[in-house]
Image (cartoon, rainbow, N blue to C red):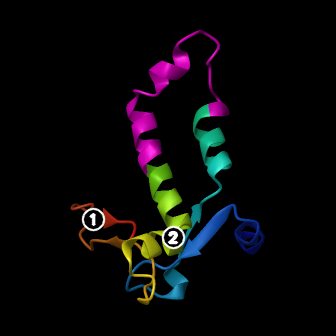
């Protein structure tokens, strides 16, 4: 099932920096599905101004940061070209600190 979801573009598999294939993570990446699940599925935007108010919420701000990250991940070749580093080999991955209390995470290296 995971293979089918990945082939259809709904999820992606990636290995965090320094981890093995067995420690791979799966992440939803379909932009419409992400938006629908977060804002439309259980939304109550029946009154005027509700959607505009939601744009200022912490939930929306967190989601927009996540969505920006997903757009960047989907366009790595274009970003590398724009930065003038398209000829340099790279591997996209995430990194987390070993200290669970620290909570440090970098999603795009």
Name the residue at 64% across, 64% down: 11
First in sequence: mark 2 vs mark 1: 2
- Is 61 on the left or on the right of 104, as rendered? right
Q: Nearer the viewer, residue 81 or 3?
A: 81
Quadrant in the picture for the N terminus: bottom right
Q: Residue at x 39, y 69 (%)?
A: 108
The label number, if any, that marks residue 83 in the structure image: none
Q: Looking at the image, is 46 positioned above or below residue 104?
A: above
Residue 73, image x, y percentages: 50, 66
Q: Which residue is mark 2?
A: 78
Task: Indicate yes or no whether the magenta region holds residue 56.
Answer: yes
Q: Which mark is residue 100?
A: 1
Front residue of 69 and 4: 69
Viewer-closest of 49 and 38 = 49
Determine whether, in the image, residue 74 is placed left or right of residue 58. right
In the rendered image, residue 60 lying in the magenta stretch gets the answer yes
Q: Give the SS element for disc 1.
A: loop
Q: Position of residue 70 (x, y in %)?
A: 51, 58
Find residue 83 and report its horizontal and vertical position in percent: 37, 72
Q: Which residues are magenta?
A: 40-65
Q: Who is closer to the viewer here, 96 or 57?
A: 57
SS of the residue at dot 2? helix
- Contact between labelled residues 1 and 2, with CB atoms less than 8 Å apart: no
Figure quadrant of the C terminus: bottom left
């Amino acid at each position: 099932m995971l293979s089918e979801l990945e082939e259809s573009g709904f999820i992606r598999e990636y290995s965090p920096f320094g981890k093995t294939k067995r420690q791979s993570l799966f992440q939803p990446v379909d932009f419409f599905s992400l938006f629908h699940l977060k804002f439309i599925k259980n939304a109550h935007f029946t009154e005027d101004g509700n959607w505009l108010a939601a744009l200022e919420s912490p939930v929306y701000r967190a989601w927009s940061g996540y969505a920006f990250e997903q757009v960047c991940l989907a366009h790595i070749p274009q970003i590398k070209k724009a930065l003038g580093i398209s000829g340099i080999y790279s591997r996209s991955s995430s990194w987390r600190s070993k200290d669970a209390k620290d909570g440090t995470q970098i999603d795009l290296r």
